[in-house]
Amino acid sequence: MKHERQARTVPFLVLLGLLSALAAFSLSTWAQTPGTWTPTESMATANAAFARTLSPVAPAFDDGTNLIVNGDFEMGNTGFTSVYLYGLITEPGTYVIGSNPSTATGHWYDWCNFGDHTTGTGLMFIANGGSSVGHFVWSQAVTVDPNTQYNISLWGATINTYSGGPAQLVIMINGQALGGVTLPANCPAAGGSWVNLTSSWNSGTNTTAVVTIRDRVTAVGLNDFVMDDISLTAIGSSQ
């Protein structure tokens, strides 16, 4: 009876050995599968890793990418449109891309000597203000993501030594006025400064943003200004 009991125990031990080997093989195979749990990981770590394989990666908002092409005007007179005429800027409603208002072609005697906003030595949009608020100064269409919050920004300055009616710049997107700023009475070289106009905009269902800048002042005298560093950046999703 004793030998018979031992004989019956042998198959059980063999079966137990096979199960142990199978389990070891399964764990080894499992450990070789990317993104799955290994015996050295905690279950919490395994669950987190598995959840990452199911969840979509959130878009990288607020990455500082400027959607405006040539917003600093370093590429010259390209990437945007304007109702203002390009070239000689003696007359109202004209502009040039240059590095200094006082040396721009057709400049007036009271236009100040100063550099651009970006580096002080680069290019900027130099304008002799127009006589119609309906004439947009600058415009550009860019592709945007729907249901996304954006920040729009520009820098401007008066180029007259003194102006009793300096330009009032307004930013619009798809016909919606987002904000405006009255430039200082003096140019940066005569006690004034560059000023920043910034506002936020939600794209809603839009996939295109037509960004437009206008000057509200229609006086033909002393309504002269510069613009630089125009930007449109995503700052988050509204979903």
Image: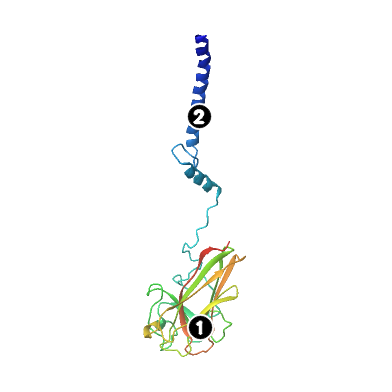
Tell me the quarter of the image containing the C terminus: bottom right
Residue 236 in sight here: yes
Please state which of residues 89 and 232 is positioned toward the viewer in this rendering. Answer: 232
What residue type is disc 1 on?
Gln
Question: On the image, which quarter does residue 112 sit in?
Answer: bottom left
The spot of residue 195 in percent (x, y) is: 44, 78
Would you name the residue on which mark 1 appears?
168
Please state which of residues 142 and 239 is positioned toward the viewer in this rendering. Answer: 239
**Dot 1 alpha-carbon crowd within 10 angstroms: few under 14, some 14 to 19, many 20 or more:** some
The spot of residue 59 in percent (x, y) is: 52, 57
What residue type is disc 2 on?
Ala
The spot of residue 3 in percent (x, y) is: 50, 9
Please state which of residues 41 and 78 is positioned toward the viewer in this rendering. Answer: 41
The spot of residue 224 in percent (x, y) is: 47, 85
Would you name the residue on which mark 2 appears?
23
Disc 1 from disc 2: Cα separation: 77 Å
144 with respect to 184 (left or right): right
Please tell me whether residue 222 is drawn above or below residue 67 in the rendered image. Answer: below
Q: Secondary structure at mark 1?
A: strand
Q: Are marks 1 and 2 in contact (CB under 8 Å)?
A: no
Residue drawn where x is 37% and y is 83% of the image: 189
Please state which of residues 7 and 133 is positioned toward the viewer in this rendering. Answer: 7
Label of residue 14 in the image: none
Q: Residue furthest front?
A: 1
Q: Secondary structure at mark 2?
A: helix
How is the structure coloured here?
rainbow
Residue 77 in sight here: no
Front disc: 1 or 2 = 2
Residue drawn where x is 47% and y is 36% of the image: 31
Q: Closer to the N terminus: mark 1 or mark 2?
A: 2
Residue drawn where x is 42% and y is 74% of the image: 123
